[in-house]
Image: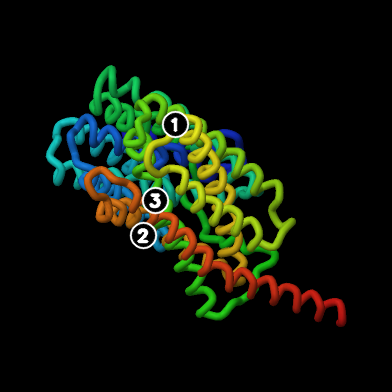
Amino acid sequence: MIAKFLAGKNSVDINSRSTICSVFLIGVIAPEVFIVQPGFVQGLVEILGFDDKGAGYTASAEMFGLAATTILMTFISHRVNWRGVVFWSLLLMFAANILCTYTTDLNLFVALRFVAGLGAGSLVSLSFAAIGLTHNPDRNFGLLIMWVLVYGALVLWAMPTAYAIGGMTLVLWFFAIFPLTAMPFIRYLPIAGENVAQVEADAVNLGNGMKGLALFAMLAYFTAQGVVWAYLFLIGVSAGLTDQQVANGLMLSQFAGIAGAFLAAMIAHRFIRSVPLAIGIIGGAICLYFLVGTFGFLVFAAAVGVYNFFWNMSHPFLLGAMASFDRRGRVVVYAVAMQMVGLAVGPFLAASVISDGNYLRVNQLGAALFVLSFVLILPPVLAQARIRQDDAVIAEAG
């Protein structure tokens, strides 16, 4: 059976439609739970009976598993058979999700979510690596993000109905079966890929201090995202909205996220990065002000929509900035690792500040981390811009 799924040409055209579509499918499967994490956490609380803290620890465990293998694959991806890794990762996600249907014990459930995250992390790493080898990685990364957000919108919208029909078991079965849909397409993936850095044309070599600030900015930004994203569904419900109203608002926010990613692609390199980063990061923090206390559906939908728009607009600029801070492309590799660690730590920190179903501290913590990330990223962004300007002046004088 394994040979059947792994069979195929030893050498594939990475730019062929079959290979790119296969990579897109795997790239959507990888964050299948994270991208709908607010709805998943809501199910843990309302159906399995976990308290808010337990649900946060569960979400955090899965992201720690995802972060662990994403970081590991950064170092070993050039030594392993990509098709084999994808095959076993898909099976691992299938098995972990199925086993989750047989337990409501918090500790065992947390352990199984960690295992599911281990499988997902490999898929994240290899799908990103494969897209990075294509002729047009910028366009393909944008398309992947859009497909992930479309998946998230549809699943978030359907989750309340799925819970009503089959409870958490039905949702977990979906998370188990969805990875198996990629099995027939493994043969179109490359067996291995070269670890070739995609260095930005405006890259400069910043000092280690500036690089350190940039990496901590990435950690702070995605820790803030992890803090807020996991609890958005419960924040909406606690404000008096119905489950379906919250699901509808989050679905609409995914489409707003698509618009944000598209805008980033359209205005790339037209402004110094500090401008869109200031708007996106600080704007995201401000949105959290409107998600406090009691509010109606329109306020919730507008706030989470603008929040998701700014998130997906800021993300490409952050990655672009990281890629411009050294000419070897190593900073962006470490930055992706920081991103995964932040998304893992965020739900854990949020769970530690919740008190009696009150999410004010969650929003405050998220907003503070957003502001911190902007303060940290601003010096290296401005330093890179100054060096580029100086190089241009020298070039003109020469």
Residue placed under numbered mark 3 in the picture: 363
Give the side of residue 258 with respect to residue 225, left or right.
Answer: right
Q: Quadrant of residue 282?
A: bottom right
**Callout 3 environment at 10 Å: few (<14), some (14 to 19), or many (20+)?**
many
Q: Are marks 2 and 3 in contact (CB under 8 Å)?
A: no
The residue at the point 33 percent across, 43 percent down is 89
Q: Is 21 in front, or is 145?
A: 145
**Callout 1 environment at 10 Å: few (<14), some (14 to 19), or many (20+)?**
few
Instruction: Give the image location of residue 178, x and y in percent.
Output: 37, 30
Q: Give the amino acid type for the residue marked by disc 1 in the picture.
A: Gly
Q: Give the amino acid type for the residue marked by disc 3 in the picture.
A: Asn
The residue at the point 36 percent across, 26 percent down is 242
Give the side of residue 306 with respect to residue 167, left or right.
Answer: right
Mark in the foreground, 1 or 3: 1
Number of the label disc, if any, that sits on residue 296: 1
Instruction: Give the image location of residue 25, x and y in percent.
Output: 47, 35
Number of the label disc, if any, that sits on residue 72: 2
Q: Are marks 1 and 3 in contact (CB under 8 Å)?
A: no
**Callout 2 environment at 10 Å: few (<14), some (14 to 19), or many (20+)?**
some
